[in-house]
Amino acid sequence: MRSFQLIRLAIEAEALRLRHHARRTLKRLVFGYFALALLFGALMFGHVAAWYWLREHLAGQYVALIFAGVDLSLAVILAVLASRSTPGRLELEALEVRRRALDDAAGSLSVMTMLLRAVDLLMSSRSPK
């Protein structure tokens, strides 16, 4: 019976780990999409800045360059945040609980299998031929 409890515990730990992994992946996707949007905005403002600078040498091009620089900086920050996401403490603990429970369950099942085999051999040797 203990092995079934260990297997159930392993399944619950894995479900918890997968839920937290899904949340972390969703956050990474959101940061990544915002980074892409800001990167496209930075490219757009960079083009606007070049156009202003080439067309007329007024302060308008500096404003566009400032927007492009800010958008590019934000895109880099969000991309770094999205790529640096690592498993949290809860995910790692749930993974360790699952590993231990499965190892213990496998050990219990191995002992049970050996005991059943020994009983079977004992019974077959005692039966009249």
Image (cartoon, rainbow, N blue to C red):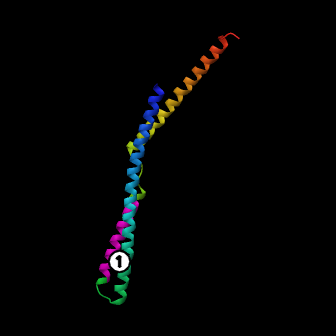
Task: Describe residue 7's horizontal placement relative to residue 59 as left or right.
Answer: right
At which x and y percent is residue 38? 36, 69
**Residue drawn 38% across the image and 51% down it:** 23
In-image side of 21 versus 105 (left or right): left
Is 101 magenta? The answer is: no
- Quarter of the image with the C terminus is top right
Q: Where is residue 48 in the image (x, y as percent from the top left)?
A: 35, 81
- What amino acid is found at the position of numbered circle 1 in the picture? Phe
80 lies above or below 63: above
In front: 106, or 69? 106
The residue lying at 52 percent from left, 26 percent from top is 108
Q: Nearer the viewer, residue 121 or 103?
A: 121
Is the residue 75 above or below the residue 16 in the image? below
* Left or right of 109 on screen, residue 11: left
- Up the image or down, 51 lies above or below 17; here it is below
User: What is the residue that sits farthest to the right in this orientation?
Assistant: 129
* Residue at 37 percent of width and 68 percent of height: 37
Image position, residue 104 (x, y; %): 49, 30
Residue at far bottom of view: 56
Residue 74: which quarter of the image? Answer: bottom left
- What residue would you read off at disc 1? 45
**29 or 52, nearer to the observer:** 29
Q: Range of the magenta residues?
A: 61-80
